[in-house]
Image (cartoon, grey):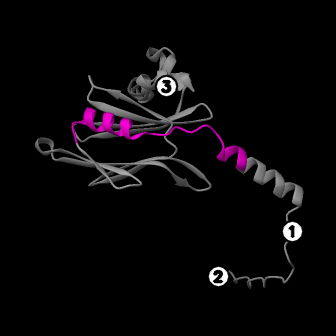
Amino acid sequence: MKKKKPLKKSSNKKRPAVKKSASKKLSAVKEAVTDEKKFNISPVDIDKIAHSLGVTKQDFGNHYRMYLENPPEGRKLTLEIYPNIPIGTRKGTLITVYTPTAHLQLQFCSGYVVSEMLGEVTFVGTSEGKLSGLIIEKGAACSLYANVDTDLLSGDITQLGPEVMLSSIALSLTETIINEK
């Protein structure tokens, strides 16, 4: 049987203070990040989204809520959209989905695409060449594709493995808004 080592007592030494120049650099980075161009979802956008999903919206002042239900398939989904709210040290649009078995969030939504033909809305977040898409279907279903390489959307999908092909197909509608940024 091994002997347990005694715990070390913490020393009373103070940690060195962060240099002022490093502190100034950090606040400059924070300012730059805070001032970045943001997507602001408007009440008109909310109306388009609700209309395309065939639901009414509820306005709670700082966010909107939409209930989707598909009784024949036993599906329920609640979609909440928080335009321009604080997320950490920045502000952005937050998309939240609640289902009986899942809770999904897309922080810093940078756009959306409505497809009347498919009966769905795709919310998109992009960062450093990666894309996350949260797809809400009129039939109260949802899909999340996270951290997808944006190059996959414009490439030859027949060269992709079946495991990743679906994300490229599902998110291909978003290519137009990604190229605008």
Residue designated by label 2: 1
Give the CA distance from mark 3 to mark 1: 45 Å
Helix, strand or loop under label 3:
helix
Closest to the camera, between mark 2 and mark 1, is 1
Q: Main secondary structure of the magenta part?
A: helix
Left/right of residue 14 with respect to residue 88 in the rendered view: right
The amino acid beneath tag 1 is Ala
Give the CA distance from mark 2 to mark 3: 63 Å
In this picture, which residue range is highlighted in magenta? 31-55
With respect to residue 76, does 17 lie above or below? Answer: below
Closest to the camera, between mark 2 and mark 3, is 3
Closest to the camera, between mark 3 and mark 1, is 3
Helix, strand or loop under label 2:
loop
Give the CA distance from mark 2 to mark 1: 43 Å
* Number of numbered labels in the structure image: 3
Helix, strand or loop under label 1:
loop
Q: Is residue 32 in the magenta section?
A: yes
- Label 1 near label 2: C-beta < 8 Å? no
Residue designated by label 3: 177
| Residue at the image point whose x is 47% and y is 34% from the top | 111
Q: Position of residue 88 (x, y in %)?
A: 59, 56
The amino acid beneath tag 3 is Ile
Residue designated by label 1: 17
| Residue at the image point whose x is 26% and y is 29% from the top | 119
